[in-house]
Amino acid sequence: MDIPSFGPWGFVLASERAIDPASWAIDVPTRFLNAEVLPAMFILPKDFQGQTVEVNRLARPIIVQYQLISVGNYIKSRVGIALLFF
């Protein structure tokens, strides 16, 4: 799921049976979530699939470095400027 101010977030569901979000009913009023959007929340875009990353920990907040790299790559792709983050 993409949270605009935080970027992509993931979550884990566990079950002894297959999980099929397309079969779930939404029994409460929602503003944005509907039956078509729900299954899409379980799919990561291609640029996020198959990446090996470190676990983010309080003692080593690696997610900060990943975000800085991501922002740097975005800016380079848009304006051709290399940024150094250290």
Image (tube, rainbow, N blue to C red):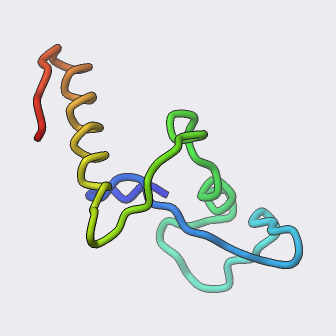
Left or right, 71 with reference to 46: left
Q: Position of residue 18 (x, y in %)?
A: 86, 68
Name the residue at the front extreme: 59
Q: Quadrant of the C terminus?
A: top left
Count of residue discs: 0
Write down the quadrant of residue 26 in the picture.
bottom right
Q: Position of residue 13 (x, y in %)?
A: 67, 73
Residue at x 21% of width, y 43% of height:
68
Front residue of 65 and 12: 65
Write down the quadrant of residue 33 in the picture.
bottom right
Location of residue 16 with respect to 34 vertically, above or below: below
Name the residue at the top extreme: 80
Q: Position of residue 21 (x, y in %)?
A: 75, 66
Name the residue at the bottom extreme: 28
Residue at x 81% of width, y 65% of height:
20
Left or right, 44 with reference to 5: right
Location of residue 76 with respect to 2 vertically, above or below: above
Location of residue 21 with respect to 40 vertically, above or below: below
Write down the quadrant of residue 38 in the picture.
bottom right
Residue at x 69% of width, y 58% of height:
39
Residue at x 26% of width, y 70% of height:
59
Q: Position of residue 41 (x, y in %)?
A: 59, 58
Front residue of 3 and 46: 46
Left or right, 57 with reference to 22: left
